[in-house]
Image (cartoon, rainbow, N blue to C red):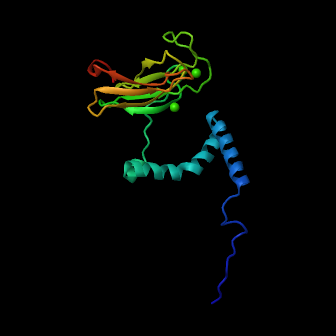
Amino acid sequence: MAAAAIRPEAGLNSPPSRDDQVAHADSERADVALAAAGDQQAFERLYRQHTARIHSLVRRMVGADGDADELVLVFQSPVGSVLDSPDNITVTPNGAILFCEDDASGDNDTHPLAPGITDVNRLIGIGLAGEPFEFAVNRLNDSEFAGATFSPDGEILFVNLFGDSAPNSGMTCAIWGPWEKGPL
Ligand SMILES: [Ca+2]
Ligand SMILES: [Ca+2]
Ligand SMILES: [Ca+2]
């Protein structure tokens, strides 16, 4: 019986060079921009590159393959004035949702409750009926909300304001209810 050795191509098993890593990151950034602009092929390339790793991460979080296979879209913002670039989220004791905006639109949006401020950040709630509403507006500065979380007894909502360059402009707010009178 003859044994044939299959020689890997040179470099096949060696780690990617720094130049290769930079080129990959550049092409991935380009695909993200294309996908955000609606390019379906760019989206599919990103999907193929990342789906296995994301599925593995979600699988570890939910603890069951069946659950990891199911992704439910709860809410999609139609426009930034409804919900703009949230990147922190919490679920209320009643099962409603609260988003912390981190306004990334750079469109100089204003808000009647925050005169003199542009790119205003808000806390946006999604009540049990699924309708979005403004829960709070940052009228102190243009910094973002972050880290919204309820106390273990569900009575107090804590949320951070990053603040701007002014001393003491960053803070943690504690918000009491009465939660039973609102949609959260
Ligand atoms: Ca943020
Ligand atoms: Ca904006
Ligand atoms: Ca905004």
Q: Nearer the viewer, residue 64 or 44?
A: 64
The quarter of the rendered structure image containing the C terminus is: top left
Q: Position of residue 16 (x, y in %)?
A: 68, 58
Q: Is residue 26 above or below residue 86?
A: below
- The percent coordinates of residue 66 (x first, y second) are 38, 51
Give the position of the N terminus as an image quadrant: bottom right
Query: Quarter-wise, where is residue 151 in the image?
Result: top left
Question: Which of these two is toward me, 18 or 179?
Answer: 18
**Left or right of residue 45: residue 19:** right
For residue 4, side relative to residue 140 (left or right) = right
Residue 53 is situated, as x and y percent measured from the top left of the image, at: 52, 52
Q: Position of residue 120 (x, y in %)?
A: 53, 19
The residue positioned 65% from the left and 42% from the top of the image is 42
Total residue callouts: 0
**In the image: residue 166, left or right of residue 22:** left
Residues 100 and 48: in front is 100
Q: Quadrant of residue 110?
A: top right
Ligand 3 lies in quarter: top right
The answer to whether residue 154 shows anywhere in this view is yes
Query: Does the image show residue 39?
Result: no
